[in-house]
Image (cartoon, helix red, strand yellow):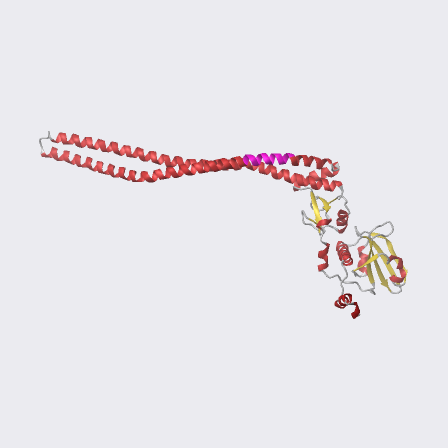
Amino acid sequence: MVPDIQNLIELQRADREILRLKEEIAALPKRVAAIEERLAGTKAGLDKAKTAVKADEAAKRKHETAIQESQQKISKYRDQSLEVKTNEQYKALMHEIQFAEQDIRANEDKILELMVNAEAREKDVKAAEAKLKAETAEIEKEKVQARERTAEDEKQMGEWSAKRESARSGVNPDVLRQYDRVAKYRGTGISEVRDQKCMACQVMLRPQTYNEVRSDKLVSCESCQRILYYDPSHDHPAMATKKRRAHPKIEASQAWYYRATHGEEGEVFVVFVNGGAESSRRIYDAASGRKVGDTLVREGAYRLAFPEELTDSVRLNGNWPEAEIEEWGVELPTATLDALHRDLNLARVEAAAPPKHSKEEAVTAEHPAAS
């Protein structure tokens, strides 16, 4: 992996950690505020319970005062009754005394009710005080933990900032500007390629782009503009063996081949087409699909006409009408190029797999005498 890519991977990791730490540090004051709000709610509950007790005590004193006033009225009315001269005056005073006695009984009932409620009120106060004490201890503990977490986050952020600057200093300035520009809008500036797909935006790559990424060239995703990289340790070539590869017919009139080198062109796909007494050959760049040179025609079937082209090559599956091939012009269609690359990958996996032995071969290997 080229140094620029390796440093960009480290840079993105540092950027992500710094962002996470900043968000966590920013969230801690909100957490402390929520803790304080919870404690304030408990204090309000205690204040409410104490206020209710005080209100009951004030109401009790009010009723006691009302009783005293009614008793004074009764004493006054009794004294006046000794001085009246008519029955009507006497009856009026007795009536006032009865009203005063009724007020005394009503206030006594209310005082009794308040005394009964006073026990419940006291229990509410004690419960609120106990809750406040417990929550205060717990909240102080949480606040200490929050402060410690903040201090640790700030320490880690300093360490990651140093790693970030170290990674940035190791990246080509032009590449770094592209990374920063994309990361500003996308959140990340580099993405891994796996199974011919950009893992960030999940868009399939063109075979040419995929091959360039695998060869450690600095390439950007055409969809999301992130810089792409390939990690061979994450590749799963063995998965391709789940699909059984069909083998092309030897005597087919059309044959596709892959060659790792072809003159100065490098990797190419070659197609031969037999037609009557002659055969044709076309060559395409394996990465871009662009046609290389002109169509070459020779007498005889392609195996006799182009024997030098068949050495150091891999036979592939592929069969398209020659008229269609002509319509392609100077570049293979993307679907055709993808199909050739898929079959080439299967052929490589097949070639790398250990040979399978039949049961008879296994018996022969274990018991040579049986042969």
Q: Position of residue 288 (x, y in %)?
A: 79, 50
Image quarter of residue 124? top left
- In front of the other: 284 or 38: 38
Outermost residue on the left side: it is 85
Q: Is residue 152 magenta?
A: yes
In the image, residue 22 sits, relative to residue 252, either above or below, namely above
Outermost residue on the right side: it is 299
Q: Position of residue 97 (x, y in %)?
A: 17, 35
The mark tally for this picture is 0
Q: Is residue 180 visible?
A: yes
**Rendered-image quadrant of the C terminus:** bottom right
- In front of the other: 223 or 231: 231
In the image, residue 215 sits, relative to residue 345, either above or below, namely above
Q: Position of residue 315 (x, y in %)?
A: 81, 59
Q: Main secondary structure of the magenta part?
A: helix
Residue positioned 52% across, 35% down in the render: 143
**Rendered-image quadrant of the N terminus:** top right
Q: Is residue 306 visible?
A: no
84 on left or right of 272: left
- In front of the other: 289 or 251: 251
51 on left or right of 153: left
Q: Is residue 310 magenta?
A: no
Image quarter of residue 58? top left
Magenta segment range?
A: 146-158
Image quarter of residue 132? top left
Q: Position of residue 296 (x, y in %)?
A: 88, 57
